[in-house]
Every structure is written in structure tokens, then in C-alpha cells.
Amino acid sequence: SPIFHADSIADPIALFQGVEDRVVPRDQSDSLAASLRTRGVPHEYHVYEGEGHGWRKRETVEAFYSSVDRFLRQYLLG
């Protein structure tokens, strides 16, 4: 789990969390995001209501891919 390696993450990272995720509890993602924020690691944290470990809603899928595209353009293309 990335939460056990949070202190070693230094590169920009995007986190995506479904509120109803039973595989990765939200508190783990919240803790990881808090660690990144505290250490000034560039990151985005997106939480999707009504979603589990995979996206089912069209609007979530569209928001997810839009966020991924923006993140990659920002950090890979500069």
C-alpha cells in the first residue's frame, strides 16, 4: 500500500478515491494526501461520491479522464 511509503513519494502524484471504496478505505487516501500536502509534494486528490473501487457513473469517468489528462499535461509536458 502506498500509505506505508508516503514519506518516500517526492514526484507529483494524482490520487483518485471513491467514497464507497471497500478495497482502499478513504481514510488511507486522506492520510496519504495529508502527508503529501505537509511535505509540499505536488499532488491532486479527487474524491468521487457514490463510487467504489471502480467508476460506474458516466460523469465520474469523464471527470477522471479529464483530471488525468490535465495532470499529465501539467507534469509531463510542462
Image (tube, rainbow, N blue to C red):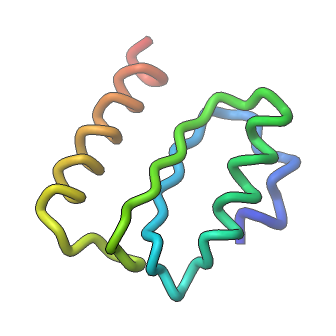
Residue 74: percent from the left, percent from the top? 42, 20
Q: Residue at x 78, y 27 (%)?
A: 40
Residue 60, quarter of the rendered image: bottom left
Image label count: 0
Q: Residue at x 68, y 58 (%)?
A: 30
As drawn, the residue found furthest toward the left would be 58
Give the vertical position of 75 relative to 66 (above or below).
above
38 on left or right of 20: right
Residue 68, quarter of the rendered image: top left
Give the vertical position of 4 relative to 33 (above or below).
below
Q: Residue at x 58, y 41 (%)?
A: 13
64 on left or right of 29: left
Residue 52: percent from the left, percent from the top? 39, 79
Give the vertical position of 58 relative to 41 (above or below).
below
Image quadrant holding the C terminus, namely top left
Q: Residue at x 38, y 61 (%)?
A: 48
As drawn, the residue found furthest toward the bottom would be 22
Residue 1: percent from the left, percent from the top? 71, 72
62 on left or right of 51: left
Give the vertical position of 63 relative to 42 (above or below).
below
Residue 47: percent from the left, percent from the top? 46, 56
As drawn, the residue found furthest toward the front would be 49
